[in-house]
Amino acid sequence: MTDQARNAADAMTGSMKDATDQLKAAGGKAAETSKELNGKILDQAETNVREAFAALRAAASAGSMGDVLKVQGDYVREQSARNMEQAKEIGEIIANFGRTAMSGMGNIPGMGGNNN
């Protein structure tokens, strides 16, 4: 094997090792993000259930049909705002993961970046 071929093989082996290390790190980040995402979803579900039961209690103790409709309207309005905020929180977690994952991909052969 010539020195040039040996150098090329060593460079390719080094690049592949770097790519493997970066993919392993991305996998670890994916697991971490999944755990964060699952926890956030469970927290949000708990909040939604708690608020739904609070609205049910308020409707059950309402003095008139008008009061029931007010409780229902307030709940729908508040839940809609909560849904928007919750979607934003989930979106931010996913977007942050995407940005982090893609920032490490530039040095992987075939994935863009400055590969020679």
Image: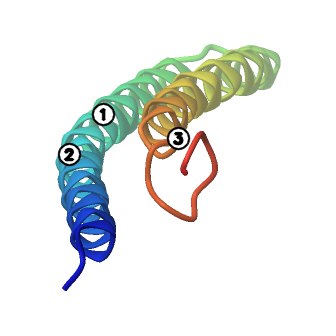
Percent x, y for residue 16? 27, 65
Say which element carries label 1.
helix
Say which quarter of the image contains residue 41: top left
- At a point 57% along the width and 65% down the height, the residue shown is 110
Q: Amino acid at mark 2?
A: Ala
- Compare marks 1 and 3 and give the one earlier in the sequence: 1
Q: Are marks 2 and 1 in contact (CB under 8 Å)?
A: no
8 sits left or right of 96 in the view? left
Q: Residue at x 70, y 24 (%)?
A: 84
Query: How far apart in space, not on screen, are marks 1 and 3 (Cα)?
Result: 32 Å
Find residue 25 and name its label.
2
- Answer with mark 3 or mark 2, whichever residue precedes in sequence: 2
Foreground mark, 1 or 3, reads: 3
The residue lying at 44 percent from left, 35 percent from top is 97
Q: Quadrant of residue 49?
A: top left
Between the residue at mark 3 and the residue at mark 2, the CA separation in whole angstroms equals 12 Å
Marks counted in the figure total 3
Q: Is residue 90 left or right of residue 64?
A: left
**In the image: residue 65, left or right of residue 34:** right
Q: Nearer the viewer, residue 94 or 12?
A: 12
Residue lying furthest bottom: 1
Q: Which residue is mark 1?
A: 46
